[in-house]
Amino acid sequence: MGTVHGNRQCPAPARVLVADPSGPRTDEEGGRVLMVTYCTSQQQADAEMAEWLKTAPGTSMPNNYGNQCSAAMQHYSVALFGRPWDQTLGYGNAIDHITNASEAYFVKVWNDPNNPNQLPRPGDIAVYKGAAPLWGGVYYGHTGAVESFTAYQQTLVQQDGAAQPAQLFPDGNYYSVKPAHKGTFRYVGDPFVGDIRGWLRPRWQKVVYSGADKRGYGSTTAVTNPGTTTGKPQAPVVTADLWMPGATRSPQPGAVNLNTRLPRRAAWHITSDVDPGKVQPSFSGVATYLKNAGYCPHLMWDPFTGHVEQFYLANVGARALKAWNEDGARHIQIEVLFSRGAYRDGKQYWELKDTPLKGFAQIIQWLDSHGIPRTWPMGPTPPIGTAGRRDVGVWNSGAGHYGHSQVPDNDHTDPGLFPSITEIPVATGKGTATATTAGDDLLEGLLSMDQATFDREKKKPGTPAWHLANGRDHAAGLTAAVKALTALVKGIPASVLQAKVTRKGAGSEGTVTQAEALAYEKANWSQDRANQQKIIEQQAQIIALLTEKKAA
């Protein structure tokens, strides 16, 4: 995949085989006449598309701007129709293809947000809007050929103009040279490519027949997997905010594909720059430099004011490291506006831990929600100027927090001595990305919600309140404590949980909330199970002793 995709148009190729629908195909330079046959059925065309989808990954398909996503679809169009792509796919950026493509060669299937059963076919060209505007506030979009799909997402054979590696091109810019590969995207709200605009469906009568069906390709090659649920959703469901709540959003191009097989982590930097007189530079000045240089982290944070600006979503890699930006199912980088020895508000500061640390707790709690544990796998960060431990084995296996000084193949020594992350309270009332020891806090947060908070939270997909109010088993991403509560009180609103009830039996006539009564009963059940287990174990011991005695 990559990042927010922007793919530039290029001129039509100077030389290409031109297919005449009446029969012969002519090489315009060589003057040769080649006979061409067109598909006589949808099945034959499906086989031709399936062969391209199978063989294209690993192939480099450039245009004048490198391996852009549009370049791959230009090559795909020529392969299907045997004509110059400007006559079939048309000019424009990726977002423009569904508008500019020739209806003589494609059926245009515009996305209908009110039709959840509208799904693509393998071989369709998918056209996305893009996740955010790029240069000049323009959406460039993304495009690729549909290889397979489910009710929620589709897998494309694609190229990515922002992907690494990149090379210098004659126009003086660097463009991707990464060959075609597969990428999977949601239909709606995908963090990389935004919303689907629609699909270009090749007209089978126009597809050149090369005998792909006789080479074993066909409908079974491009497998679809609609799953148990039909229809594409109209909004993604997440269990943690990809944008940090309260942060100023400033999306940037150039995000990095994450290696999700590696542990979740956070990496901490400090800006280090000082103005004349050892004055701390302005937040906006440093942020502008990072954007222009292409070195943006996920977050830039001012520990004196608490201001946070976010440049990338949490589920992609940022660009603040010299190397290894891509390592981790989450790899969230934070740049702290702090320079050792600089003056701020008339006072000189030598260590980050001595600053007011405004907003620090909120950042740590947001990192918690993405399953990043509060540990330092390489140990405490060393002082500025001291080389840190950079153990590749630990990096590849240890989830948690790292200083820039601890990242392999990097040479910076920031952030220096770091404030404690374990003393910050765990946030309550919101689900986390993984089952952690925060379960009791989550349960307490749910039980203590007032009605207004419950009504607000139940509208946010993935929160404990949402799972509870929906009365459905969507609890796969919640902690065991919230799962247990959901099983007990599905559909019961917070107002009922807070209602006062009178206890019977032990503690008779005492008044507690319904939630406390449920928790009390749950504890009793747990104790009963433990007691029953002890009885069973004791009975087994007695039987074993009797058996030994009888044998003797």
Image: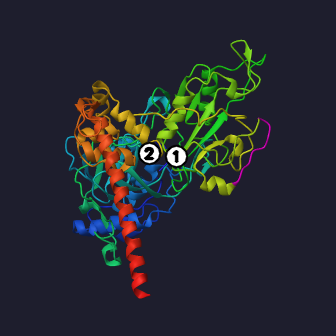
Which residue is at the front of the view, 123 or 241? 241
Q: Is residue 387 rendered magenta in the image?
A: yes
Q: CA distance from mark 1 to mark 2?
A: 11 Å
Query: Quadrant location of the C terminus?
Result: bottom left
Numbered range of the magenta stretch: 384-391
Which mark is on residue 535? none
Which residue is at the front of the view, 251 or 344? 344
Q: Which residue is mark 1?
A: 330
Q: Is residue 364 rendered magenta in the image?
A: no
* Disc 2 secondary structure class: loop
Three-letter amino acid code of the residue under disc 2 = Ala
Q: Which residue is mark 2?
A: 433
Q: Earlier in the sequence, mark 1 or mark 2?
A: 1
* Disc 1 secondary structure class: loop
- Counting from the top left corner in percent of width and height, residue 91 is at 39, 44
Which residue is found at the position 59% from the left and 37% from the top?
Answer: 422
Which residue is at the front of the view, 450 or 265? 450
The quadrant in which residue 158 appears is: bottom left
- Counting from the top left corner in percent of width and height, residue 233 is at 27, 45
Locate residue 27 relative to residue 376 in the image: left or right. left
Residue positioned most to the top: 346
Which residue is at the front of the view, 514 or 226? 514
Contact (Cβ within 8 Å) of mark 1 with mark 2: yes
Residue positioned most to the bottom: 552
Q: Residues within 10 Å of mark 2 (few under 14, many from 20)?
A: some
Image height check: is 375 above or below 336? below
Locate residue 436 relative to residue 461 in the image: left or right. right
